[in-house]
Amino acid sequence: MADPDSTTVSNTPVGIVDRLVGFGHALREHGLPVGSDDVLTFCAATAELSPGDPNDVYWSGRTTLVHRRDHLPVYDEVFRTYFLNLPMPPDSPTAPERPVPQGNTGTLDVPDSEPGDEQGDDQPLVLGLQASSIEIEREKRFAACSPEELIQLRRIMARIRLEPPRRRTRRQTHCRTGPRIDIRRMARDAMRLSDGTPELHRIDRKERTRPLVLLLDVSGSMADHSRNLLQFAYSMRRAAQKVEVFCFGTRLTRITGALDRRNPDDAMSLAAARVLDWDGGTRIGASLDHFVRKWGRRGLSRGATVVICSDGLDRGDPRLLTDSMEKLSRLSHRIIWMNPLIGNDVDAPPDTLGMPNTLGMLAAGPYIDELASGHDLASLERFAARLPTAGG
Amino acid sequence: MRDATAVGSPASVPELQQRLRNHGYLAGRGLATATFIGLRLGQPILLEGEVGVGKTELAKCLAAIHGRELIRLQCYEGIDTHQALYEWDYARQILHVRALSERELADSDTVGDLYSKDFLIERPLLRAIRSGGNAVLLIDEIDRADDEFEAFLLELLSDFQITIPEVGLVAATERPIVVLTSNRTRELHDALKRRCLYHWIGYPSVDEELEIVRLQAPGVAGKLAEQVVTAVHELRDMDLAKPPGVAETLDWVDALGVLGGEKLDGETAADTLGSVIKDRDDLELVHAELDRLVADG
């Protein structure tokens, strides 16, 4: 199969090949990642079937040009217009995004992006090495910062070196003081030495990073913090591989993919565009429930440290929140709740954070393993530093 | 050598559908087309879909209709090459060395024998490479394996050859049929997906599922089968944590068949609900709606 196309494609009449290749281009224009190799396979596949039958063309294209389930609706639309000459519906999907129904309280608000950010300046700095002029801003609450200060803060945040939490895996590696004996290695030695006792070798289990799931509250009451948290999530996503990011207000949106852009501005605006309920109301319970049902049950949060960034001002039913928190705690390794309201109590020492007295927090309280603040840069740094050992 | 017409590759999509059907597997046009193209072009087929819609079953049927051996690699977190590819049988090697005399040990051939096939434990992937055209390789639940393993698999799937340092290059003379399945607990790498033909298996329609039940459980009363399938479809529309798959439908039909009922009523449904619903919260939800479900059927 090294070269499936050379013989089979040449049997297909030229006009049809043009048509098929054109279809690949049309898909690409609508945002599907269709490579030249995919198009070659598509042509070869269609040649095996009957190119005159729309059914065959549809299914061979669907299996060779589409690699994700989310892309299927777009494929169907493009197929309809390209081959069947049917008009596109007015709000046809162009981006590979599942259609999200418009909410009743949601408003679309793309956050400001920082102008003129130079690329290539993303070398990670170790904590505490920032310029001294910024040092003073560290304890200043995000809510009290001017826009310029916020932009600078975000730059620093982008460079925070984050170490994700770790866990032990089943894989084993040579280790001086490991708990188990490495039979394989000793057998090798025994054969090499032919007699005499081989040296005792030991192995231990390797460590790997634990998945991290961030659930960010972007509702109105969190407006002062949500964009910074988004930036924080971006840094996190850059620093570690297994990071999933979701936003919620009245509904849950997954923005992991959007944050993968190299340019932070692109990433942030793309993520912001996906979230349709910026600064709206909060239904934490319903959003968490959605997360549990849609993602948690599938194993996304299994063994993961889940970080919920919210003020706990829930407008939904507290019973739903308790219920979904209970399920979430069973599906994940550890739940950390980051609440900016904690930081407002300036007199409280950072490590003896009390539980804020909102109804939402009371409902969720029993299932929270750890509380954190997140109202200023210093608290985010403290949080980042504590992550590697969070929950062990 | 088998009779080529009996075990050869199907010549068209309908023929493939018919032959799968003869083995009790009902494949829709889309799935059959994807499989047919995969067979023709020698590309791996990646099947994604909800739990229990017959992803694994397809590989078994493909093996059956081609008269090939099914080699299954079940993936799990932390799987490594020793479990997937090959391993040396160290204990036997040592015993062998101990049994040799000094003089025999000096002979270079004897030492070479230590790394002969006798001491090589074949794991599924090596076995598939060696069997080549006589095998159907099923890589099950690839989403459970780690990323590194996926990268390794990518390499293997493109060349179908590996190098064992002590033995040398092992290459497949003919490619085996490869089927990968994923439950989408995580997103697979695009590179792997690109190497495969992709097909999403959804839940079947009522008519299709009814036909599946008739194929798989021919002894069941028609009325009962209809009721069960309708009820299962209602269940899938409910907001369940774990909606029942086709496998659960068949389990339920079997369970009811054991009880010997001719039709589904509230009581028998409640008694056998454990075959379809596997979650406590779901059970509570369904129990409340049970009468309606059965009445509809």
Image (cartoon, coloured by chain):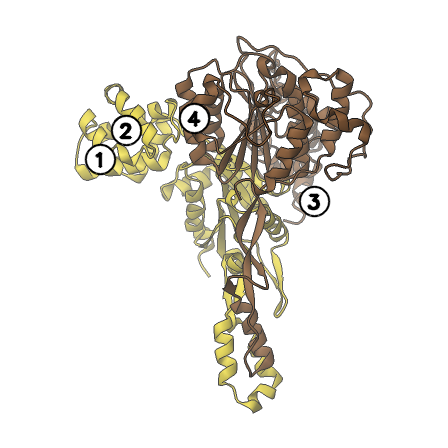
Chain letter of mark 3 equals A
Could you tell me residue B44's position as x and y percent? 56, 45
Residue of label 1: B256
Chain letter of mark 1 equals B
Q: Amino acid at mark 4?
A: Ser
Q: Please tell me whether mark 2 sits on a helix, a strand or a loop.
A: helix
Q: In the picture, residue A109 is in which quadrant?
A: top right
Mark 4, other Cα within 10 Å: few <14 / some 14–19 / many ≥20:
many
Number of numbered discs on residues: 4
Residue of label 2: B228
Q: Work out whether residue A32 or residue A174 is closer to the camera in this orientation and state it.
A: A174
Tags 3 and 4 on a common chain: yes
Q: Which chain is brown?
A: A
Chain letter of mark 4 equals A
Q: Nearer the viewer, mark 1 or mark 4?
A: 4
Chain letter of mark 2 equals B
Tags 2 and 3 on a common chain: no
Please tell me the numbered disc located at residue A324.
4
Q: Tell whether A133 sits left or right of B187.
A: right
Residue of label 3: A6
Q: Please tell me whether mark 4 sits on a helix, a strand or a loop.
A: helix
> Looking at the image, which residue sits at the far bottom?
B103
Q: Which callout, 3 or 4, points at the residue further toward the start of the chain?
A: 3
Q: Colour of chain B?
A: yellow
Could you tell me residue A43's position as x and y percent? 65, 36
In percent of the image, x 76 and y 29: which residue is there? A135
The answer to the question of whether label 1 and label 3 lie on touching residues, with beta carbons closer than 8 A, is no
User: Eyeballing the image, is B273 above or below B23?
Assistant: above
